[in-house]
Amino acid sequence: MAEVIDILSLVPHSLNLRSNHLWLDYDDEADVLYISLRKPQRATDSEMVGRFIYHYEGNEVVGVTVLHAKASTGADAA
């Protein structure tokens, strides 16, 4: 049940996105979360800010890569 509550906490943030679709891929070995707002992304530029890499097509964000994703949840990265 806790997972459902955690997922539901994403609803308000998801509604603020300019995309009708959201794809999530998580690489457990690398602890990297890939968030795509468009498939395929076809990013033309990227910008790294802290643990986040923002992927752009022109001026539009089409994806975000979250490095050390477990750190965002407070979970052990071990």
Image (cartoon, helix red, strand yellow):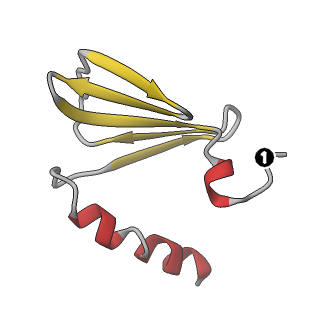
Question: Which quadrant is the N terminus positioned in?
Answer: bottom right
How far across and how far down the image is residue 35, in percent? Answer: 39, 42
Q: How many marks?
A: 1
Element type where label 1 sits in the image: loop
**Residue at (67% x, 50% y) in the render:** 70
Most extreme residue toward the bottom, as rendered?
1
Left or right, 49 with respect to 59, comes to right
The 10 Å Cα crowd at callout 1, few under 14, some 14 to 19, many 20 or more, is few
Which quarter of the figure is the C terminus placed in?
top right
Within the image, what quadrant is residue 58 found in? Answer: top left
Question: In front here: 8 or 48?
Answer: 48
Q: Residue furthest front?
A: 49
- Residue 18 against residue 30 in the figure, above or below: below
* Quarter of image, res 34: top left
Task: Out of 51 and 70, give the one closest to the viewer.
Answer: 51
Read off the residue under disc 1. 77
* Residue farthest right in this picture: 78
Q: Amino acid at mark 1?
A: Ala
Point out residue 62 in the picture as x, y percentages from the top left corner. 25, 34
- 76 vs 25, left or right, is right
* Residue at the image point whose x is 26% and y is 21% from the top: 43
Tell me what residue is drawn at x 23 percent, y 21 percent: 42
**Image spot of residue 3 (x, y percent):** 57, 74
Q: Is residue 75 above or below residue 61?
A: below
Looking at the image, residue 50 lies above or below residue 58 = below
Of residues 32 and 71, the one drawn nearer to the viewer in this rendering: 71
- Left or right: 74 with respect to 61? right
